[in-house]
C-alpha cells in the first residue's frame, strides 16, 4: 500500500485557492478534503460541516488547548484551524488529503508533516491580484492595501514550498497541480511497501 499524501495548497488572499481546489476536488473525488474549523460567520449558502465547522471563539480555544488542531492561525480577525485527527486517519489509511489554508498555517504544517506536498499558488501579477480582490466587492481601499502588502510578504517566503503554480487560468492551474500530485505518488518514500514486497519476493524465490 502506498502511503497517503498530505497536499497543501496555499498562497495570498485573492489568488483563487478556493476555486482551484474546488475544481481539483471535482476532478479528483478520490482526494479527501480537510474541512477547517473557523470562528468567522458563515457566508450565504455556506453549511456547517460542509464548507467549514463554524465555532465560537471559546470552542475554538478549547480545541487549541486540547491539541486537536494540526495548525491554526488568525486570518484577518478570525481564527482558522485544521482538525488534526481526520488528517492523520486519512494518511494512515493510505489516502490523500487536501488542505487549503493560509500561509501562516502552512508553515506550521511544514514543521508537523515535512513529507507533505506543499504548493504555493501565485497570482499572474500584483495588478491582477488587486483586480481580483476588488472584484469580490468586499474590500475597502484600506483592506485592499493591507492584503496587497501581505501578499508581497507572503510571496517572499514562497521558496519554503516545493512547487509554485501561477493561477492565470483556473483549468491550467488545476491541471498543473493534478500533474504534480500524480508525479508525487511515485516518490520512493511513499512506496516503501512496494519496494519491500519486491525484495521479499526475491529472497523467497
Ligand atoms: P475565507 O474566510 O475566505 O473562507 O478564508 C480566509 C483564509 O483562511 C483563506 O486564505 C483560507 O485559505 C484560510 N484558511 C481556511 N481554512 C484554514 C485553516 O484551517 N487554517 C489556516 N491556517 N487557514 C485557513
Image (spheres, grey):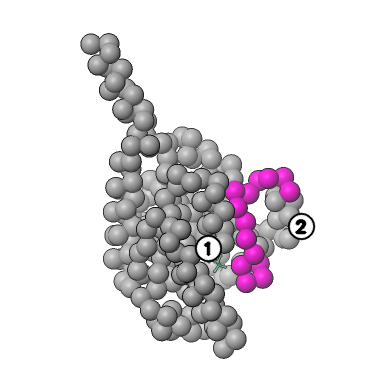
Query: Magenta stretch?
Result: 65-78
> Counting residues from the N terminus, which is met first, the one under dot 2 or under dot 1?
2
Q: Quadrant of ligand 1?
A: bottom right
| Residue at (37, 58) in percent of width and height | 163
Residue, disc 2: 58
| Residue 95 picture location, percent across and down | 42, 40
Residue, disc 1: 103
Q: How crowded is mark 1: few (under 14 residues within 10 Å), some or many (20 or more)?
A: many
Q: Ligand 1 closer than 8 Å to the CB at disc 2?
A: no
| Residue at (48, 46) in percent of width and height | 114
**Foreground disc of the pair 2, 1:** 1
* Residue 2 is at least partly visible in this image: yes
Q: Is residue 201 above or below residue 192?
A: above
| Residue 66 picture location, percent across and down | 72, 45
Would residue 10 be found to the left or right of residue 58 on screen?
left
| Residue 141 picture location, percent across and down | 57, 88
Amino acid at each position: 500500500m502506498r502511503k497517503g499524501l498530505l497536499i497543501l495548497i496555499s498562497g495570498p488572499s485573492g489568488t483563487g485557492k478556493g476555486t482551484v481546489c474546488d475544481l481539483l476536488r471535482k476532478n479528483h473525488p478520490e482526494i479527501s478534503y480537510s474541512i477547517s474549523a473557523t470562528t468567522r460567520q458563515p457566508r450565504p449558502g455556506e453549511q456547517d460541516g460542509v464548507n467549514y465547522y463554524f465555532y465560537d471563539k471559546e470552542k475554538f480555544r478549547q480545541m487549541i488547548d486540547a491539541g486537536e488542531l494540526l495548525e491554526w492561525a488568525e486570518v484577518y480577525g478570525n481564527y482558522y484551524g485544521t482538525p488534526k485527527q481526520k488528517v492523520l486517519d486519512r494518511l494512515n489509511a493510505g489516502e490523500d488529503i487536501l488542505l487549503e489554508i493560509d500561509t501562516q498555517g502552512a508553515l506550521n504544517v511544514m514543521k508537523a508533516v515535512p513529507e507533505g506536498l506543499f504548493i504555493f499558488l501565485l497570482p499572474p501579477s500584483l495588478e491582477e491580484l488587486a483586480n481580483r480582490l476588488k472584484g469580490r466587492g468586499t474590500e475597502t481601499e484600506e483592506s485592499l492595501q493591507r492584503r496587497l502588502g501581505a501578499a508581497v510578504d507572503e510571496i517572499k517566503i514562497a521558496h519554503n514550498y516545493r512547487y509554485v503554480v501561477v493561477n492565470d487560468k483556473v483549468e491550467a492551474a488545476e491541471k498543473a497541480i493534478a500533474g504534480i500530485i500524480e508525479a508525487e505518488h511515485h516518490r520512493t518514500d511513499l512506496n516503501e511497501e512496494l519496494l519491500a514486497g519486491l525484495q521479499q519476493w526475491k529472497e523467497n524465490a
